[in-house]
Amino acid sequence: MTSEASRIDRVAGFLLDLQDRICAALESADGGARFVEDAWQRAEGGGGRTRVLKNGAVFEQAGVNFSRVSGERLPPAASAHRPELAGCPWDALGVSLVVHPCNPYLPTTHMNVRYFEARTKSTDPAWWFGGGFDLTPFYPFDEDVVHWHTVAREACAPFGDDVYPRWKQWCDEYFSIRHRAETRGVGGLFFDDLNAGGFERCFGLTRSVGNAFLDAYLPIVERRKDTPYGEREREFQLYRRGRYVEFNLVYDRGTLFGLQSGGRTESILMSLPPRVRFEYAYAPEPGSAEARLADYLRPRSWI
């Protein structure tokens, strides 16, 4: 049987290496800016290392966070779907990233893989994995979206033909901006509460998703980073970034858990774009490139 300590240490080792690999790859793709690391400790237990790249040649801002935090009493608000764990000691580990490119033709992206464990007095520790990745284009290209979903499907394939379609649907449903009746982007994968089949299978599947991120995103970066654009495209990008803010502050479970559990505010809100604009009752010109985006903001089968 895998012990509690070895489970957490193994996951932490993978996550630290994943953060290193993703940061190195994004720095190489940018070609100029470097990540600055901010290591921090949490008074209640644990800490992390927040890495942020700013004002690069390709990426306006990219944040790649590792955190390993713990607490003696899980807040009720943070255990709404598992109320029996409220007040229990807990550990949470994860790598979370958001990339906001300079070029409006290059999509914003998000990835997260995480592990959670809580200990009760009467039962074995409760544990599960979660995560996924999703893509948020402003000027979408079908070949990019198909590539993104093809890599997502391949990451899931060794673990069953049913995994990708279920997690793709879950992603569409989770990243829904319900008050706008649209999705945040073109989806990808989302999963949570993963513990079926035992620790080794679940850890393997989570590793596969985390490792697939660069294969999914970097080819899109290479295709779109040098696409010419002007003020019109930039203004539309800033406007659509407002939807990202809306989702993260209203619906995102990771943001809400971090704030409710006393997490580090700067690291939690690193996902927000550095520049954004809101415009009252904006509507794109019918038939324009900007109006075309609406067709991509509802679930569909891409592959």
Image (cartoon, rainbow, N blue to C red):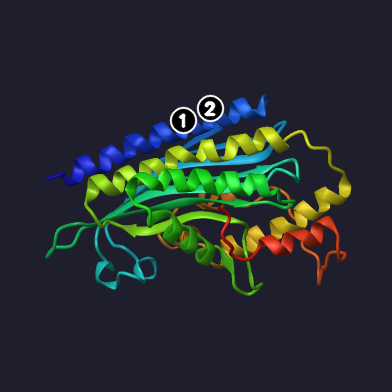
Question: What amino acid is at disc 2?
Answer: Ala
Q: Quadrant of residue 83?
A: bottom left
- Residues 88 and 60: in front is 60
| Mark 1, secondary structure of its residue | helix
Q: Position of residue 98 (x, y in %)?
A: 57, 46
Report the quarter where the N terminus lies: top left
Residue contact between numbered discs 2 and 1, judged by CB atoms under 8 Å: yes
Question: What amino acid is at disc 1?
Answer: Asp
Is there any visible trace of residue 124 in the rendered image? yes
Q: Position of residue 196 (x, y in %)?
A: 25, 57
- Residues 216 and 233: in front is 216
- 144 lies left or right of 173: right
Q: Which residue is at a point 33% across and 48% down the rendered structure image?
A: 159
Crowd around label 2: few <14 · some 14–19 · many ≥20 (10 Å): few
Q: Which residue is at a point 64% across and 58% down the rendered structure image?
A: 244
Image mark for residue 238: none
Image mark for residue 20: 1
Rounded to the nearest angstrom, the CA distance separating label 2 from label 1 is: 6 Å
Q: Which residue is at a point 47% across and 60% down the rendered structure image?
A: 259
Q: Position of residue 263 (x, y in %)?
A: 44, 54
